[in-house]
């Protein structure tokens, strides 16, 4: 998924969890900043509010596989 610079996404919950690998740029949420090469694993029912800053981000996302 390509995120344009300065993009804000609404807060949301992950049913079944989510994993993100940052391929380019920096992915952000209220928990931190994740530069290229970062791997983020969010458990079932976790919530976050993701965004990008000036460099945008290209991320690989897998959802729904981290069951209850």
Image (cartoon, rainbow, N blue to C red):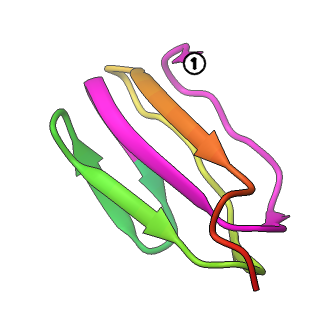
Tell whether 18 sits left or right of 67.
Answer: left
Looking at the image, the residue that sits furthest to the bottom is: 68
Q: Identify the image quadrant of residue 45.
A: bottom right
State which region is magenta: 1-27
On the image, the x and y values in percent for residue 31 come to 43, 74
Q: Quadrant of the N terminus?
A: top right
Identified at 43% across, 50% down, the residue is: 28
Q: Which residue is mark 1?
A: 1
Q: How many marks?
A: 1
Tell whether 4 sits left or right of 34.
Answer: right
On the image, the x and y values in percent for residue 22 come to 31, 34
Badge 1 element? loop
Identified at 18% across, 33% down, the residue is: 36
Tell whether 61 sits left or right of 34.
Answer: right
Query: Above or below — where is 23 with respect to 10?
Result: above
On the image, the x and y values in percent for residue 67 come to 72, 75
Identified at 44% across, 27% down, the residue is: 59
Q: Identify the image quadrant of residue 4.
A: top right
Q: Identify the image quadrant of residue 26.
A: top left
On the image, the x and y values in percent for residue 2 come to 53, 13
Q: Report the front residue among 26 and 59.
A: 59
Q: Quadrant of the C terminus?
A: bottom right
Identified at 48% across, 35% down, the residue is: 52
Q: Residues within 10 Å of mark 1 (few under 14, many from 20)?
A: few
Query: Above or below — where is 34 with respect to 26?
Result: below
Does the magenta-highlighted stretch encompass residue 3? yes
Looking at the image, the residue that sits furthest to the left is: 37
Tell whether 37 sits left or right of 57.
Answer: left
């Amino acid at each position: 998924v390509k995120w344009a610079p300065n993009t804000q996404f609404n807060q949301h919950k992950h049913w079944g969890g989510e994993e993100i690998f940052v391929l380019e740029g920096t992915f952000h949420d209220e928990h931190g900043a994740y530069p290229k090469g970062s791997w983020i694993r969010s458990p079932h029912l976790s919530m976050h509010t993701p965004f990008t800053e000036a460099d945008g981000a290209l991320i690989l996302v897998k959802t729904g596989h981290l069951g209850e």
